[in-house]
Image (cartoon, rainbow, N blue to C red):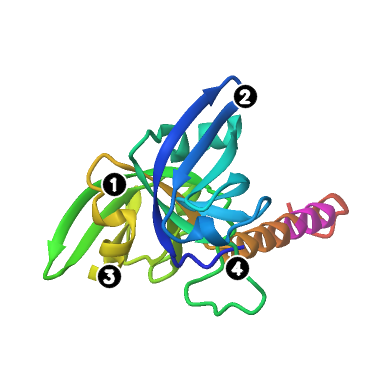
Amino acid sequence: MFTGLIQEMGRIDAVTRKADGASLRLRTETLAASARIGDSIAVNGVCLTVVKRDDTTLSFDLSHETVRTTNLGRLKAGDRVNLEPALRFDSKIGGHFVTGHVDAVGTIRSRSQIGDMWRFEIEAPREVMRYVVEKGSVAVDGISLTVVDILNDGFSLVIIPHTAKVTTMGFKGPGDSVNIETDILGKYVAKLLAKDSDRDERFLRALSEGGFLGR
């Protein structure tokens, strides 16, 4: 579990493609020194397990599914990524609960400057948008952000100067891909509502078949 508050930007050192996935090695300024083998770290919002480390680098294995369904499969040496270590029980929650399980890859459609801030429009699949609400929380490349507007095929965000400085959103633009994870609370609510809907339909069908409802 994570909070969506990025602790550091790392830089990709090497990506090795494999038949069943890939391996990833990245360089960090601070996280590598404190990390341990087996630790969970969110890389662009994807929960990964540290398999090797030294004082300056961390290595991870990526499954075929991770390569296929996130933007980690598009990384190359030199690329920068957002990093966040897993939440501890005594940690403060400054963003929102982020699981590190990406729902879909979106695409930045536009980036425009508003004063010293930046407005982004991000295209997202329909199945993801059902969980995105105006003024709600969403994780974009692992960053906890607030949705400004709901669009026909996506949503908009406003990035403050600090976020632009310390995360990858500061240098991303139109055409770039981003990992999207919607708020887990919305998913639970949607599932509960779906269960209630199914139960009501079954109840009404039983009444109709029993002759208790008019034709």
Mark 3 belongs to which amino acid? His
Mark 1 belongs to which amino acid? Ile
Give the distance between the C-alpha atoms of the residues marked 2 and 3, in whole angstroms.
38 Å
> Is tag 3's residue or tag 4's residue first in the polypeptide sequence?
4
**Magenta extent:** 199-207
Q: Name the residue under label 1.
A: 108
Query: Is disc 3 surrounded by few (<14), some (14 to 19) or many (20+) residues within 10 Å?
Result: few
Q: Is residue 178 left or right of residue 182?
A: left
Give the distance between the C-alpha atoms of the residues marked 3 and 1, in whole angstroms.
20 Å
Q: Is residue 145 left or right of residue 35?
A: left
- Callout 2–callout 1 Cβ contact below 8 Å: no
**Mark 1: which secondary structure?**
strand
Q: Name the residue under label 3.
A: 162
Q: Residue at horizontal 84%, vertical 49%?
A: 209
Q: Is residue 121 left or right of residue 192?
A: left
Q: Name the residue under label 2.
A: 20
Q: Is residue 94 visible?
A: yes
Q: Mark 4 points at which residue?
A: 87
Query: Is disc 2 surrounded by few (<14), some (14 to 19) or many (20+) residues within 10 Å?
Result: few
- Expressed as whole percent of the image width and height from the top left, the position of residue 128 reads 48, 50
Q: Is residue 144 left or right of residue 97?
A: left
**Mark 3: which secondary structure?**
helix
- Callout 3–callout 4 Cβ contact below 8 Å: no
Q: Residue at horizontal 45%, vertical 50%?
A: 44
